[in-house]
Amino acid sequence: MNKLDIQAYKGVWVFAEQRDGKLLDVGLELLATGRELADKLGEELVAVLFGNQVRSLADELASYGTDKVLVADSPVLAVYRNDSYSLALTELVNQRKPSIVLVGGTTIGMDLAPRVAAKLGTGLTAHAVSLKLDKDGCLLAQIPSFGGTIMASICCAKHRPQMVTVPPGFLKKPEKKTAKKASVETVKIAVTEKDVRTKVLEVFRQEPKSKPIQEAETVVCGGFGVGSKEGWKMVEDLAGALGGSIGATRPACDEGWAVQDEQMVGQSGKVIHPKLYFGIGISGVIHHLIGIKDSKVIVAINKDPKAPLASSADYVIQSDFRQVVPALISELQKIKK
Amino acid sequence: MPDIRYWDRLSLDPATKTLRREGIPIVISPMDKNAIEEALRIRQARGGKVTVVSMGPLNTEDILRSAYALGVDDAVLLTDRTFAGADTLATAYVLSEGIRKLGNVDLVLLGNESLDGSTGQVGPQVAEFLGLPSITHVSEITFTDETTVQVKSNIELGFMRIETHLPAVLAVTGDINVVHIPSVWGALWATEKSIAKWTCAELGAETGRCGLTGSPTWVPEVAPIDVKRRGEVLKGEPTQIAVQLIEKLRADGVLPEI
């Protein structure tokens, strides 16, 4: 690989994914963090938008604190295909040489970014949960590794751009729209249908009945200690009183109280990061703790004072949840009135 | 990948910050097993030969034996000191060179992501180096003719149905099939089979693109994650506890507006 002139690469890019004419939140989250990085580096923040007839989305993006929106508006980019998107993004990077390219870790982002990195021969870090700069201005992407027992910082010192994917929900939410509007530049791309080797026959999506647990600000989780379907009703009632989502440990899912695919929290389930987490009847094995450790405040309700969740919680209630939960619900209802 | 049951014994080399795997058993990543299973399923329906390719130290042989036990026809281990410390780009490069050396490969199947690194990057990167189309998150593969496949590719809250022509690279998810348990005969057969070992020189790979040298990313620092918190115990009658807790949550700014 040839030595790169690293100094020639400037600017922070965010690939702002849209689906069916809607900007994904993860792109806006990346813009908020991208803004901080760009300010520290004294460089430009650029939002990159791909699609067909997406000018109005470009205008919307322009109000999320970016300096510029680069929009490639073409029928060849209408629906996501690995070839068209990866060729177009590679082409733009080669022309304009950004120092950092951030991509949302959606299924599509995770399909796109590796191919682009391979075309560019540069480094890509997956599943970063936070981003910072080292003293030389190199990007450090932080990822929990090996079951979340260690946090590794990964950098890409000698290659550009520095590419990272970040899963939805890990970075702070974007600021409200700014009054200042960034400039929107439409770029032509060389990619044509001839370059595309896959054909999308169908896109099927079903809106969820409830908000995904990963996006909830309040989550009430129940474990095996809840004991019964009747006990589980209390978990649901507390979640209802708090306007939160319901999560579960693996044993609770095994008991059939909750749905594993949607509600299981932990290493092999969902990683959540609510403001407020309640753990009811949960012992707190490490596999579960990894999934909740980014919660702002953790409350543990468990009769067993030796439950490991107690030492990983902010507030510990060592009483029977059957008494405490109804008391909590009635106090919460008093506030409501 | 290193066996998940031994992750607490993994350590990092302080100089290179790469994993020290000595003494840790190696297993096939769960989704790679699904990829093998799918390959065997396709072989049964359409004929052909299934070859597993892995990059790793010499003890990776053990997992290739377990692939034999599942029923694959051939196994190749890409092994060389220069491959050590590879990130996904360097891993994908070496794997693509191995697949290239096999020649005339119709379909490359791999797990969408490993359980250890869990990057999901190797599939598209192998495809890029081989100049092939790739589809990830594949949960169903259907052949419509000799060289055309239609696949279901999972996306958030749904899927895309995508068609492509072989040769292609498909990265499969855990829900594509159920991995069968190897039979006793399979296990016996596995001990008889030989495993080809190809070095960097035999692959004709560029050493500068392999292992630590060929890896654009590296790990400058690692820190243990601490899950300990203040653990303030709230005492009293249920109502007292409830009142105290609500006050504290409000002070912390996390009490939802209801």
Image (spheres, coloured by chain):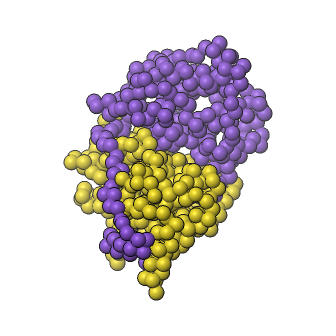
Chain colours: A yellow, B purple
Q: Percent position (x, y) of residue B201? A: 45, 17
Residue at 77% of width from left, 40% of height from top? B145
In front here: A35 or B116? B116
Residue at 52% of width from left, 66% of height from top? A322
Picture quarter with the N terminus of chain A: top left
In front here: B37 or A327? A327
Q: Is residue A153 left or right of residue A28?
A: left
In this view, the residue farthest toward the left is A135
In this view, the residue farthest toward the front is B237
Number of residue marks: 0
Residue at 25% of width from left, 56% of height from top? A41
Q: Percent position (x, y) of residue B4? A: 49, 35
Picture layout, residue B234 above or below residue B137? below
Please say whether residue A234 is visible from this viewpoint: yes
> Residue A4, located in which quarter of the rendered image?
top left
> Residue B158, located in which quarter of the rendered image?
bottom right
Picture layout, residue B10 above or below residue A162? above
In this view, the residue farthest toward the bottom is A337
Q: Percent position (x, y) of residue A110? A: 50, 49
Q: Is residue B228 left or right of residue B110?
A: left
In front here: B19 or A175? B19
Please say whether residue A181 is visible from this viewpoint: no
> Residue B229, located in which quarter of the rendered image?
bottom left
Residue at 45% of width from left, 58% of height from top? A303
Q: Percent position (x, y) of residue A104? A: 46, 55
